[in-house]
Image: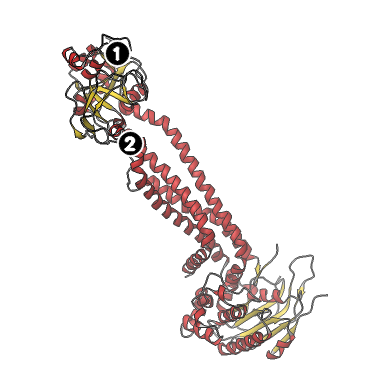
Amino acid sequence: MPDMTSKTDLPADSSTAPRQALRICNLSFRWDATQPPLSYPDITLNTGEHLFLRGPSGSGKSTLLSMLSGLIVPDSGTLTLLGKELANLTSGQRDRFRADHMGVIFQQFNLVPYLTTLGNVMLPCRLSEQRRSQAMPTPQQEAESLLTALGIPQSHWHRRVTGLSVGQQQRVAAARALTGAPELILADEPTSALDSDNRDRFIALLLELAAEKHSSVIFVSHDQSLAQRFDHRITLEVAP
Amino acid sequence: MTVRLAFSLAMASLWYRRRVLALVTLTLTLSITLLLGVQYLRTEVKQSFTNTVSGTDLIVGARSGQLNLLLYTIFHIGDATNNIRWSTYQQLQEDERIGWLVPISLGDSYRGHRVVGTSEQFPEHFRYGRDQKPELAVGEWFDDVFDVVLGARVAREHGHQLGDDIVLSHGGGRTSFSNHKDTPFTVTGILAATGTPMDQAVYIGLDGLEAIHIGWESGVAIRGRTVTPEQARKRDLTPETITAALVGIDRKVLTFQVQRHINESGTEPLTAILPGVALSELWRIMGQFEKALLGITAFVVITSLIGLVAVLLTLQAQRRQEIAILRATGASPMLIAGLHVIECVILALAACGLAVVAGAAGVAGLSPWLLDTWGIQVGLRPLNAMEWLIIACVPAAAFLVGLIPALQAWRGSRKQGLGHVIPE
């Protein structure tokens, strides 16, 4: 049951730019009754700030991202994104909210195999009116400039993504997450399949472009060496 | 916007999986072609069937069932139980209600084709199809005792031309040992193809039929009693009996009255039938088979639709990642489910389109062969309401079966975490 008593002093009105990107309080979740619940420290993150989330396997990193994305609902505690309490939204509204305000990057296999590189990058603009209107100057041009910035050769833009290397695929996924300037970018170990050169370049580009778009990056990784690039760092522990 | 997105994603996804899906679409196409073909041919064959005779109000023969009478007089199938006397025929001619009479005498054959003995009344009054006259492709109708007019297929099959001499056989059957070899006939005309049993028949005059049977009274030729053509011409060639007569009645309201009058005739036991009624009874019997055939082909279509779903469900396993991406990007479970339904319906529509094209090509390609071999006239025509309904049923059924993978995807995507599927 979501805890409704926690104080949400942010205005629910979304027209004023919310200062808080993320705020979680007493959050816990359990996949099934036989396992101990996963519980999370309280986190507050202002817009534009980045968060590094570290923890061993089983510490609930991916589960937290699933809750943040609105795909699953916490058992208890509050989860407020951009001033909106996610538990108060229907599943359809959460899908809409995710399309409008979030970009997502997975560990690997990030791309729809039957779409072209540009088609993949522009996908959020086709699912969300808001993302499309925020894509400057047009979805196509923004996608092209993001791909250029992320170093994807122009010859690949109109081809299907199956020809891309793993590093290129991750960068295309980053371009997709960034397009339409969403307030939040959820990155679930996006560098674990990359070698160290590619990894450093990827993070540098991601954070730089996110700063340009005023997006907050929530970056999950077990790689401690990446942590110093982030304003906020949180380490999750495995429940005893 | 979502509908357009779902549609374009579905198209891209189908194209991506075209190799696997081409095979199931082909299966579906073949089964729809089969279903459509059966339905199409059913209508065409029925048409061709009812086209065999038109304008004849009554068929009169010796007492028998109406199907038997119809089959041997019009379709040249089976044999007459008995003949009717020439005097009876003459009595009918004197009946004022009867407009015209066409005598028909059967019993002989030419290389397996029926010989129809008739008179000049036949080309004058017999009609088939939509009131069409039997037209000659070349030559003229029989005039002399030993003139013969061949049906289109008889002439083509045996390569006969005008002026050829042919020898008729006594009795039916493809190979006969008792031939009327003393009295050959000369081909004076060849009929145009009609797509009816006429194409398979050979027409001679009643006098010719009488002439070749002089000396054959016991059923075989008796030496010394047979005659040469010259001798035959000098004889009185009026027949004693004929097999049947086709009757035309000027005032149609009197048809039933004349029918009853003939059926109750005191001179000899006769049967008069209405060809339309007999045809529909015959079609009712045959109709059972073609309904069964239609049912079987409908099952074939259902089977291939199930095959389509089986393939789509198999593909589902490969699509988990793609669905995870779409979900994470903000696609609703409805959109995911919609993708599956749209894909299924698009495949069905493609299969229907291909089936119509294949069917049309098939009909166009096979119709000469059908006319040649089976005497069935099948032409290209616009599809009728029933056929459109069958075509429309296929995408509708595809929509329904598409709900199976769609529902699965919908349920799966509701339980999905970010970037992975939550284990059950």
Kind of residue indicated by mark 1: Glu
Quadrant of res B154: top left
Q: Looking at the image, can residue B302 be seen?
A: yes
Q: Identify which residue is drawn at 33% across, 12% down.
A: B219
Of residues A21 and B215, the one nearer the viewer is B215
**Mark 2 secondary-structure assignment:** helix
Kindly identify the residue that appears in the image at 27 percent across and 11 percent down.
Answer: B215
Residue B364: image x %, image y %?
Answer: 34, 47
On the same chain, marks 2 and 1? The answer is: yes
**Given the image, on which type of amino acid does mark 2 rest?**
Ser
Q: Name the residue under label 1.
A: B264
Q: How far apart are marks 2 and 1 (CA)?
A: 33 Å
On screen, residue A217 above or below B54: below
Q: For this view, does B206 lie left or right of residue A60? A: left
The residue that label 2 is drawn on is B48
Q: Mark 2 lies on which chain?
A: B
